[in-house]
């Protein structure tokens, strides 16, 4: 028995959203996508004709539009944001207005409109840099950038609204990797794979810094699980969602071995940025039984296949693959 049936997905035409929406429809959910579609209307072309899908082109800062379309939905999955530090820093006021200022109004509107469950995509970057090997959900948050600071503040805002009638749950994902119809090539594993396939060179800055990663299919599986699981198991809770905490050098080696070990050149250069991130995902395993099923290797292989099939043309230059390039191009206000 599903706890939720009609799902409102902000950012449903984004990198994770495009994969999530497809899986939701496969499972028989009714889905409303609320998105600016700045990366193209074709992102959801494969499912656009599905009778259970409704797409609304809208800005999450538009409260009247949100009120109109959230009504009748029992769950909100909030993915929409200015994603990653460089995109945020391009226009900090814009970033704050989208990532923070409109967040609490969205939560209030959701509750008033009868939404029973609100799932928020935060970020593992809220921890900052920790020296311990296993960074768990109960550790202090020490965000280093405005992007991660506002993610943390949104967590606090959401948890204020937790009640028996309104289940609030927070996910702190690791860096996502793998293929999506709305491809991003500005994330660690995806960057390395793009360069290995299309230039024959991988440049690694430093290399010993750790980076937590999760396959896009696995983070989508987390959101699906949070829709189906009884409220009492997740109400007011926070879950890390990662899989492998590899060094950047290890990630580069994985990519090189899959693409072509003999032809891809690995270049290591010094860096002043020795920030190392590593998270523990034991809580979600222990409490919800969630175990990732896809490795970094699977993500690289999926991307290599997409390149070979011509799904990622002009991958070194087209702005649609790079958030900061697209933000600069459209000059969103």
Image (cartoon, grey):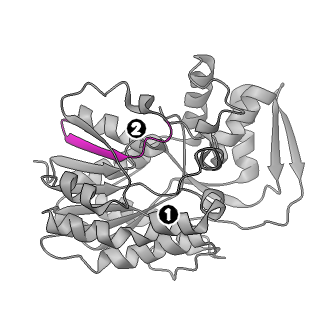
**At 21% across and 62% down in the image, what residue appears?**
117
Give coordinates of residue 244: x percent, y percent. 57, 53
Mark 2–mark 1 CB contact (< 8 Å): no
Farthest residue, direction top? 309
Q: Pinpoint residue 33: horizontal percent, then vertical percent.
A: 31, 44
Residue 259 x/y as whole percent: 71, 27
Q: Which residues are magenta?
A: 28-39
Earlier sequence position, callout 2 versus callout 1: 2
* Residue 59, image x, y percentages: 38, 53
How many other residues sit within 10 Å of disc 2, few (<14), some (14-19) or many (≥20)?
many
Q: Residue 195 colored magenta?
A: no
Question: Is residue 242 shown left or right of residue 195?
Answer: left
Total labels drawn: 2
Q: For mark 1, give the secondary structure.
A: loop
Left-right relation of 195 to 241: right
Task: Judge left or right: residue 196 versus residue 228.
Answer: right
User: Tag on residue 19?
Assistant: 2
* Residue at numbered disc 1: 123
């Amino acid at each position: 028995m599903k706890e939720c049936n009609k799902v409102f997905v902000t950012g449903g035409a984004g990198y994770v959203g495009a994969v999530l929406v497809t899986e939701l429809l496969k499972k028989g959910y009714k889905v409303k996508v609320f998105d600016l579609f700045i990366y193209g209307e074709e992102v959801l072309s494969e499912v656009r004709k599905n009778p259970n899908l409704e797409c609304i082109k809208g800005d999450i800062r538009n409260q009247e539009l949100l009120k109109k379309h959230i009504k009748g939905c029992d769950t909100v999955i909030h993915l929409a944001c200015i994603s990653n530090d460089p995109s945020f820093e391009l226009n900090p006021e814009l970033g704050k207005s989208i990532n923070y200022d409109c967040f609490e109004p969205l939560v209030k509107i959701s509750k008033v409109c009868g939404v029973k469950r609100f799932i928020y995509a935060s970020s593992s970057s809220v921890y900052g840099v920790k020296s311990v090997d296993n960074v768990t959900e109960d550790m202090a948050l020490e965000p280093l950038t405005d992007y991660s600071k506002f993610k943390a503040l949104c967590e606090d805002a959401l948890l204020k609204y937790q009640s028996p009638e309104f289940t609030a749950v927070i996910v702190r994902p690791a860096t996502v990797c793998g293929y999506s119809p709305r491809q991003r090539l500005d994330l660690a594993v995806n960057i390395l794979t793009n360069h290995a396939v299309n230039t024959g060179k991988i440049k690694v800055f430093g290399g010993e810094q750790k980076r937590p990663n999760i396959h896009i299919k696995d983070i989508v599986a987390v959101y699906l699980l949070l829709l189906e699981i009884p409220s009492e198991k997740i109400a007011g809770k926070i879950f890390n969602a990662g899989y492998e905490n590899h060094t950047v050098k290890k990630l580069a080696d994985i990519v090189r071995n899959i693409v072509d070990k003999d032809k891809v050149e690995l270049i290591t250069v010094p860096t002043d940025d020795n920030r190392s991130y590593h998270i523990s995902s034991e809580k979600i395993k222990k409490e919800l039984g969630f175990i990732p099923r896809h490795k970094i290797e699977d993500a690289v292989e999926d991307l290599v296949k997409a390149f070979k099939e011509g799904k990622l043309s002009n991958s070194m230059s087209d702005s649609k693959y790079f958030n900061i390039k697209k933000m600069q191009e459209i000059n969103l206000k």
